[in-house]
Image (spheres, rainbow, N blue to C red):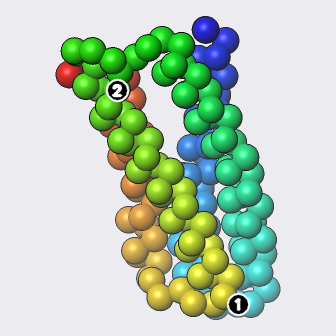
Amino acid sequence: MLWIKALHIVFIASWFAGLFYLPRIFVNLAQEVEANASERLLLMARKLYRFMTILAVPALGLGIWLWMGYGIGRGPGNGWMHAKLAIVLLLIGYHHACGSILKKFEGQRNTRSHVWYRYFNEVPVVLMLIAVILVVVKPF
């Protein structure tokens, strides 16, 4: 089970790297006026989104394996696991929101400013902080 946990952590860290970087590309796309630079940024964003989606699948699959193997979340005193699972659902939603935003940039339908994307970029940081605290401290 320790191998599964180690791989889960590696894939989560890799997925988060994409969740942290893709919105930074959106900031640059929202500021960009030169067509060549926009195309390069869009290519980078497309490749990163595909790659981080590939990384998310084993991260989530290994997490489910751990959850099933340890039986965590059942019984009293495991409220932290339910809260963490809610965070995971929010992260999956954020991941899909990134895909939707990417499609808007590809169709040249972006309506948001670079400032909005700067705030949007902070969401996975906050969610990761909460998830780590829930897993390590197990406050409830």
Circle 1 Cα neighbour tier, 10 Å, few/some/many (<14 / 14–19 / ≥20): few
In percent of the image, x 56 and y 52: which residue is there? 19
State the image coordinates of residue 111 (x, y, percent, origin top left).
47, 88
- Assign a secondary structure to mark 2: helix
Which quarter of the image is occupied by the N terminus? Answer: top right
Image coordinates of residue 41 in percent, x first then y, are: 72, 73
Residue sitting at 22 percent across and 15 percent down? Answer: 76
Of 121 and 6, which appears nearest the observer? Answer: 6
Quickly name the residue at label 2. Answer: 81
Instruction: Give the percent coordinates (x, y) of residue 97.
Output: 51, 65
Residue drawn at (61%, 8%), measured in percent from left and top? 2
Front one among 34 and 121: 121
Asked where in the image residue 96 lies, by quadrant, the reply is bottom right
What residue is pinned by disc 1? 34
Type of amino acid under label 1: Glu
Tell me the tag on residue 90: none
Amino acid type shown at disc 2: Met
Q: Is residue 15 above or below residue 104?
A: above
Q: Residue 22: horizontal and vertical position, in percent?
A: 60, 60
